[in-house]
Amino acid sequence: MSTDERAVLGDQLQQRGEPQGELIALQLALEALPATAPRVRRSLIERRIAACLDQHHDTFYGALAPHVQRLSRPDLWQRALEVHRWSGGFATTLLLQGAGPSLHEVVRIARELPIARFVRRLELGVGDHPEAVVELAQAPWPHLRELVLFANGVRIADLSRMAPLLAELELLQIHYAIRYATFEAPALTTLQLWRRRDDSAVVLDARMPALEELNYAWFAAEHGVFDRYPKLRRLTFYGDLTAGWLEQLMRSPNIERLTHLTPGYLLGDADLEVLAAHAHRLAHLELLDVSNNVFSAQAIAAVRPRLPPCVKLRRR
């Protein structure tokens, strides 16, 4: 929906006495302010938006209202819904948690809220993730493009039941997921996976032809990653590397495809020397971040003059 269309909708809603019309008008006015606008003018609109959200809290959040923080009740400890980003009177980024109602109930209720009509990014926190995933699968949010799942041992096996949703996702983050099954996500450009270091072996077999960024922790780096993901440009990995993987990557023509490379946690002084030996092949990178590794001061001093400017080391 364009800005003009939202403005028209806001006028119509205000004529019908619906508070979201005022919220749309106020947020559009805030978004239209130039960067050079006086701070006092911006603050005035922000205060009016906050007052509108507080005054019509129950209308905006429906059955979830008792579990959503408001200006006049700032000490709410457990929150079922948090709006992390607004745009033109609608929430575009939501965090949902099982606080009060169960998480899958929160997902169901939030989906029907008028303010959630254009949610693009959904983050699921504490709660019954498997049931919430099923709820998402049964009725995918039409504008959802980014999904973040926190903790609770969520498994891709659960996500394999979400084919309609995965077909549209552009970003998927799964924290502390421990096992993976085959799935397809043709539009996915960013995949971020975390698992505990002591979890059992992980199998990742996903069809993601559009993938540009892969970020994973405690996965053994695989030699075939570039063959499976031909558009990969940004690679981040934390944890175990198969023997010689970094040396092979430095020698591979695939290094020329990357713009960002972040290997972390378990690199040692010998690996730093590998990077220095291949410095001429790294100059094209926008960033090679090894700051999450612990190298000796002697190793850093020895190789720093040979490393290109794109290399980021931990400051000592």
Image (spheres, helix red, strand yellow):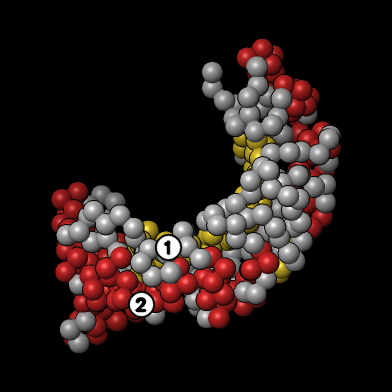
269 w.r.t. 282: above or below? above
257 and 272: which is toward the camera:
272
x, y percent for residue 281: 76, 34
| Residue located beneath label 1 in the image | 97
Res 295 label? none
Task: Name the residue located 18 percent from the left edge and 53 percent from the top edge.
Answer: 43
Viewer-nearest of labels 2 and 1? Answer: 1
- Looking at marks 2 and 1 on the same chain, the residue that comes earlier in the sequence is marked by 1
221 w.r.t. 282: above or below? below
| Quadrant in which the C terminus appears | top right
250 and 147: which is toward the camera:
147
| Residue located beneath label 2 in the image | 113
Q: CA distance from mark 2 to mark 1?
A: 16 Å
Residue flagged by tag 2: what amino acid is it? Leu
Mark 2: few/some/many CA within 10 Å (<14, 14-19, 20+): some
| Quadrant in which the N terminus appears | bottom left
- Say whether residue 171 is visible: yes
303 w.r.t. 189: above or below? above
Mark 1: few/some/many CA within 10 Å (<14, 14-19, 20+): many
Task: Name the residue located 57 percent from the left edge and 25 percent from the top edge.
Answer: 314
x, y percent for residue 220: 76, 44
